[in-house]
Image (tube, helix red, strand yellow):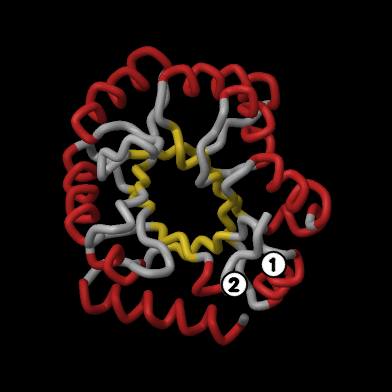
């Protein structure tokens, strides 16, 4: 685990130097990973983790690894149902998948109840795929304006999951243009197969699972 993490960080650093951009934050995608692998990542010095499901994350970081929680940064990188907003606000430091006004309202109510609001990123359906969550790129500006005017919410960045069957670079390029056009600093993009490409287009967060942990075990 330590060797894999070092290799990934070295590759991130090399890609950043080549592109002339700051190094992004490595998010270890621990969803559906067994506890022994997560324990090994913690021992290797990893402190930033990404989870897809609120309930799974609660069991891991709210119970089994609760003693580690204070030194960690947790990102929700999967779709969030409004009925899980309170639990998400209580557990996560960053919610990367804000994509609709109904969820914005639910998060505000939840934050008021638990006394904290996680940092927010807006998910963009950059490939405009019917089966994926996220805003259509052309709807982003209106959505950001609504978040500011109606709810006083100012997300720190954007996230995306490009189509699996297509080259990632054109989608990362478009994400970079969208972030720049809307004055957003954060860009969460790039996974195990393409994080170096994402770095070249200004990713500030890369989400790496299988390259760090190995293949996920079935649920």
Percent x, y of residue 191:
41, 63
Q: Which mark is residue 162?
A: none
Quadrant position of the N terminus in the picture: bottom right
* Residue at image point 36% right, 50% down: 161
* Residue at image point 30% right, 23% down: 143
Q: How many marks?
A: 2
Percent x, y of residue 208:
48, 65
Specify the farthest residue to the bottom. 3
Specify the farthest residue to the top. 150
Circle 1: element type: helix
Which residue is disc 1 drawn over? Answer: 38
Neighbour tally class for label 1: few under 14, some 14-19, many 20 plus, Cα within 10 Å = many
Circle 2: element type: helix
Q: Real-space Cα distance between discs 2 and 1? A: 8 Å
Which residue is disc 2 drawn over? Answer: 213
Neighbour tally class for label 2: few under 14, some 14-19, many 20 plus, Cα within 10 Å = many
Q: Is residue 55 above or below residue 195?
A: above
Q: Is residue 41 above or below residue 33?
A: below
* Residue at image point 39% right, 64% down: 24
Q: Is residue 61 above or below residue 110?
A: below
Q: Are marks 2 and 1 in contact (CB under 8 Å)?
A: yes
Name the image quarter holding residue 129.
top left
Q: Which residue is nearer to you in this view: 94 or 172?
A: 172
Q: Which residue is nearer to you in this view: 24 or 97?
A: 97
**Relative to 13, 86 lies left or right:** right
**Relative to 70, 137 lies left or right:** left
Name the image quarter holding residue 101.
top left
Percent x, y of residue 104:
47, 22
Quadrant position of the C terminus in the picture: bottom right
* Residue at image point 37% right, 35% down: 134
Query: Which circle, 2 or 1, is nearer the viewer?
Result: 2
């Amino acid at each position: 685990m330590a060797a894999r993490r070092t290799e990934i960080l070295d590759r991130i650093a090399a890609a950043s130097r080549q592109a002339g951009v700051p190094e992004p934050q490595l998010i270890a995608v621990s969803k559906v990973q067994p506890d022994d692998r997560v324990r090994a990542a913690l021992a290797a010095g990893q402190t930033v983790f990404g989870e897809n499901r609120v309930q799974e994350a609660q069991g891991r970081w709210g119970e089994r690894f609760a003693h580690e929680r204070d030194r960690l940064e947790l990102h929700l990188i999967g779709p969030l149902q409004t009925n899980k907003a309170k639990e998400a606000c209580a557990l996560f430091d960053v919610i990367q998948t804000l994509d609709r006004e109904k969820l914005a309202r639910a998060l505000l109510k939840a934050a008021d109840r638990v006394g904290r609001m996680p940092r927010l990123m807006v998910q963009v359906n950059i490939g405009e795929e019917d089966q994926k969550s996220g805003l259509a790129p052309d709807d982003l500006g209106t959505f950001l304006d609504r978040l500011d005017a109606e709810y006083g919410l100012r997300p720190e960045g954007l996230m995306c999951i490009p189509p699996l069957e297509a080259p990632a670079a054109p989608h990362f390029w478009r994400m970079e243009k969208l972030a720049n056009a809307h004055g957003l600093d954060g860009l969460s993009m790039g996974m195990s197969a393409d994080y170096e490409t994402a770095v070249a287009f200004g990713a500030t967060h890369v989400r790496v699972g299988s390259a760090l942990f190995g293949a996920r075990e079935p649920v």
